[in-house]
Amino acid sequence: MRVSAKADYAVRAAIELAAGHDSGPIKGEQVADAQNIPLRFLENILGDLRHHGLIESRRGAEGGYWLSRPPEEITIGEVMRAAEGPLADVRGERPDELEYAGAAEPLREVWVALRNNVRGILDNVTLADVIADRIPSGVKELGKKPDLRAY
């Protein structure tokens, strides 16, 4: 699975907003500076997150961005879907809707399993988990394993 710059930036921006959740609106420039994200790119990402109901915004001197729900209720998976769409698809199709013929027929099950594993991680880690370094133990264990097979 490849995580795009857009998805990475979206998650980091959401985490930055979550970290300041109790401080009121946070300016886009502040998020961009804190996470080293190009401001123009970030503004588009914040628009996507707002469109999907994950953040809210207000213009003006007292304006900025804030999470629409508590950080405990927003998962990394939700943020990534808002930025990029489905977490795992094949040629733009849902894995469970694929049909293969002949010897490749069982491949559908592999793609469905991949999607379920990705969801199992990203939909079970909240923004609050990351901020508090409370990554669920199963995820933390997987994160400690080195990739012994270079792609």
Image (cartoon, grey):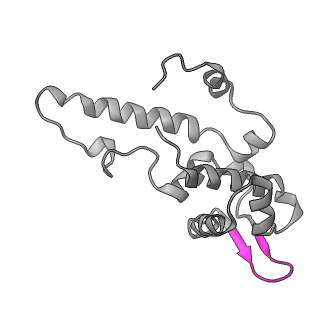
Q: Nearer the viewer, residue 14 or 119?
A: 14
Image quarter of residue 142 = top right
20 on left or right of 13: right
The residue that appears at 86% across and 78% down in the rendered structure is 62
Residue occupying the far bottom of the picture:
60
Quadrant, the C terminus = top left
Is 122 rendered above or below residue 63?
A: above
Find the magenta span and give its range. Answer: 56-65
Estimate the x, y position of residue 72 in percent, counting from the top left: 73, 47
Q: Is residue 64 magenta?
A: yes
The residue that appears at 12% across and 34% down in the rendered structure is 101
Is 23 rendered above or below residue 35?
A: below
Estimate the x, y position of residue 24 in percent, counting from the top left: 85, 67
The residue that appears at 53% across and 34% down in the rendered structure is 120
29 on left or right of 126: right
The residue that appears at 46% across and 55% down in the rendered structure is 85
Q: Is residue 137 magenta?
A: no
Give the total of numbered labels.
0
